Image: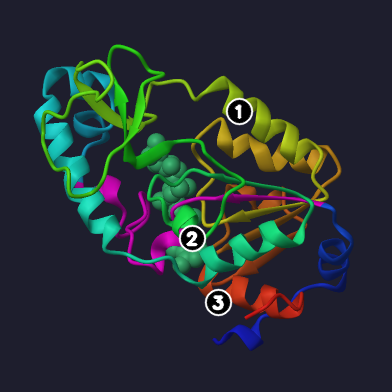
């Protein structure tokens, strides 16, 4: 299919044309066409790696060098990827709507590289380092720094990836801001997420209950299909390009 093959309901187009406040919620699927592997599904990362050996505080306490090795490997892979048209359309939507927030579960930094600025990286970012002693010490962590024992530039304590691991709480301020934004949104777009990791997975339902039009864009129906007013099936690079054309966003 090419972008002109997708069709959108008149209600959806009208909602997007009249909206003042839009929230975009993204997951690993939006970066799939950039070459970043997703987590679940046939080629998902969690098929090849055990979550509990990598993405937990216990794993880091047990063997921080092993965990750093894995994150350095991923940082290198992701750095070589580039944003795709779906990331670019999300960045254009930010310019179009006076009220806009992007809530991404992705840690790959591709939304920022595509120009998004009103963004909450709710699961963290691969290219930041967090201090193990003082979580307020956060620093850029460039891809060329591949030490397996990096230290906090502020205080010298051991550094860890600035990622929210399984069993850890999300930043309460990030959750509050995300909930407020979906609650007051006219339209919430949910792109490329399986919708199984909470609390983020509850945001589409909150949007719907608060009166927003909820739009699901995914390769396949997910947990959120019952919550959504519209389901646009296809690769996000194509469906988002088609939507951008429909709205007359600059190419
Ligand atoms: P998943 O891997 O669980 O889901 C990816 C979703 O993207 C699936 O629903 C796919 O159908 C869809 N998808 C794949 N390719 C696509 C494409 N080209 N266009 C559109 N959709 C596509 O990833 P997430 O939902 O992001 O946590 O996973 C949530 C969290 O679980 C992640 O943030 C990560 C993981 O463990 C942390 O890193 C803390």
Magenta residue check for 59? no
Residue that sits furthest to the top in the current view: 133
Q: Earlier in the sequence, mark 1 or mark 3?
A: 1
Distance (Cα) linking label 3 and label 2: 11 Å
Distance (Cα) linking label 2 and label 1: 21 Å
Distance (Cα) linking label 1 and label 3: 30 Å
- Given contact means CB atoms under 8 Å apart, are the residues at marks 2 and 1 in contact? no
**For the residue carrying disc 2, how many other residues have a C-alpha within 10 Å: few (<14), some (14-19), or many (20+)?**
many
For mark 3, give the secondary structure: helix
For mark 2, give the secondary structure: helix
How many numbered markers are drawn? 3
Left or right: 141 with respect to 248?
left
Magenta residue check for 34? yes
Left or right: 211 with respect to 145?
right
Q: x, y (%) of residue 195?
A: 54, 44
Q: Is mark 2 within 8 Å of ligand 1?
A: yes
Q: x, y (%) of residue 15?
A: 86, 61
Q: Where 82 falls versus 78 (above or below)?
A: below
Q: Which residue is mark 1?
A: 175
**For the residue carrying disc 1, how many other residues have a C-alpha within 10 Å: few (<14), some (14-19), or many (20+)?**
some
Evaluate whether residue 235 shows in this view.
no
Report the span colored magenta. 21-48
Q: Which residue is mark 3?
A: 238
Viewer-nearest residue: 137 or 102: 137
Q: Earlier in the sequence, mark 2 or mark 1?
A: 2
Quarter containing the N terminus: bottom right
Evaluate whether residue 12 shows in this view.
yes
**For the residue carrying disc 3, how many other residues have a C-alpha within 10 Å: few (<14), some (14-19), or many (20+)?**
many
Q: Which residue is mark 2?
A: 30
- At a point 17% along the width and 33% down the height, the residue shown is 67
């Amino acid at each position: 299919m090419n972008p002109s093959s997708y069709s959108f309901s008149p209600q959806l187009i009208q909602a997007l044309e009249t909206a003042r406040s839009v929230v975009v919620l993204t997951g690993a699927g939006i970066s799939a066409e950039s070459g970043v592997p997703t987590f679940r599904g046939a080629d998902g990362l969690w098929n090849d790696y055990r979550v509990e050996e990598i993405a937990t505080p216990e794993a880091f306490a047990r063997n921080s060098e092993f965990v750093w090795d894995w994150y350095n490997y991923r940082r290198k892979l992701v750095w070589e990827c580039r944003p795709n048209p779906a990331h670019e359309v999300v960045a254009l939507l930010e310019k179009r709507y006076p009220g806009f927030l992007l809530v991404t579960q992705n840690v790959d930094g591709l939304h920022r590289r595509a120009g998004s600025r009103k963004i909450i990286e709710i699961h963290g970012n691969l290219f930041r380092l967090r201090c193990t002693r003082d979580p307020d010490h956060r620093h850029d962590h460039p891809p060329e720094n591949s030490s397996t024992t990096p230290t906090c530039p502020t205080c010298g304590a051991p550094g860890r990836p600035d990622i929210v691991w399984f069993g850890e709480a999300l930043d309460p301020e990030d959750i509050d801001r995300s909930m407020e934004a979906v609650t007051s949104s006219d339209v919430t777009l949910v792109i490329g997420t399986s919708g199984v990791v909470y609390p983020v997975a509850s945001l589409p339902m909150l949007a719907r209950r608060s009166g927003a039009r909820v739009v699901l864009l995914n390769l396949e129906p997910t947990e959120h299909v019952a919550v959504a007013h519209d389901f646009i099936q296809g690769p996000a690079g194509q469906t988002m390009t088609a939507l951008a054309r429909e709205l007359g966003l600059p190419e």
